[in-house]
Amino acid sequence: MKEREAEIYALIDTALMRRYRIDIVTVAVFLKSNGIAIAQYRNKEGSENECHRDLELLREHYDGTIIVNDRIDRIDLADGLHLGQEDLSAIDKDPVKAVEKVRKRIGGKTLGLSTHNREEIEIANTLDLGYIGLGALRPTSTKEVESIGGEALLEIAKDSRHPVAIIGGVRWEDRFEEPIRYKVLGSALFERMLTL
């Protein structure tokens, strides 16, 4: 298959915002002015007030799809939810039942799930998801990762019936074949903002 430009999926991690000294409005304006259509807000340490304020500012200055990481209680401020494997199993050990419970809360909003190997992709194929995150492709400074899949991930991505968002050390210039729809940029996104 021919490689093509995957859509950028912006990872707005508040730890990166602090590291690069960039505020949420600057991020939102950058995303909008660069036509980036989807962004995930991840804040592992912030207060409820900070998260609420950030999501409101993001919505005010950015008109793309906003995905919130992990926190189903923030879904009213977003267009979708992204869960990790541990988050899903904390809802219910049976992934089908877990997704059914999530769907009752979020309705038809986008639901993404992190995957790391063929077995998790096969399970994800049975679930009502909008996309899967697959990674890590390369080492990353955004998040601690247990395994780096490298080029082998690009092969197992073909097993997914859902669109794939490739995660982990992805670069702005990377190009991917179907079914990879999104390239998730965290540090690379912030570094790009600083160079423009």
Image: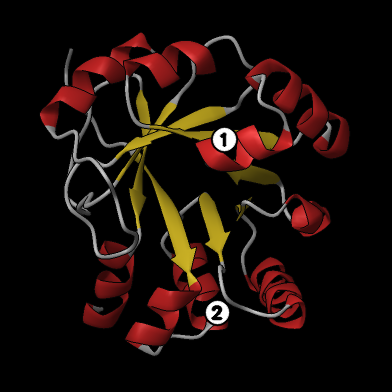
Q: Residue 13's spot in the image, x, y percent?
A: 46, 68
Q: Pinpoint residue 106: horizontal percent, then vertical percent.
A: 81, 38
Q: Position of residue 165 (x, y in %)?
A: 40, 36
Disc 2 designates what residue?
24
Q: Quadrant of residue 115?
A: top left
State left or right for residue 124 relative to residue 103: left
Q: Secondary structure at mark 2?
A: helix
Circle 1 residue: 112
Crowding around mark 1 (Cα neighbors within 10 Å: few <14, some 14 to 19, many 20+) is many
Secondary structure found at label 1: strand
- The residue sitting at 25% across, 65% down in the picture is 141
Give residue 6's quadrant in the image.
Answer: top left
Instruction: Point out which mark residue 53 bears.
Output: none
Q: Quadrant of the N terminus?
A: top left
Q: How far apart, in angstroms, are the residues tagged by discs 1 and 2?
A: 22 Å
In front: label 1 or label 2 = 1
The residue most toward the right is 104
Q: Quadrant of the C terminus?
A: bottom left
Front one among 87 and 66: 87
Q: Label 2: few (<14), some or many (≥20) within 10 Å?
A: many
Depicted 46 relative to depicted 71: above or below: below
Residue 133 sits in which quadrant? top left
Count of numbered badges drawn on the protein: 2
Question: Please, is residue 20 above or below residue 155 in the view?
Answer: below
Q: Residue at x 16, y 18 (%)?
A: 2
Residue 100 visible somewhere in the drawing: yes
| Residue 161 is at least partly visible in this image | no
- The amino acid at mark 2 is Ile
Q: Nearer the viewer, residue 196 or 137?
A: 137
Mark 1 residue type: Gly
Q: Residue at x 48, y 65 (%)?
A: 12
Nearest the viewer among 52 and 64 is 52
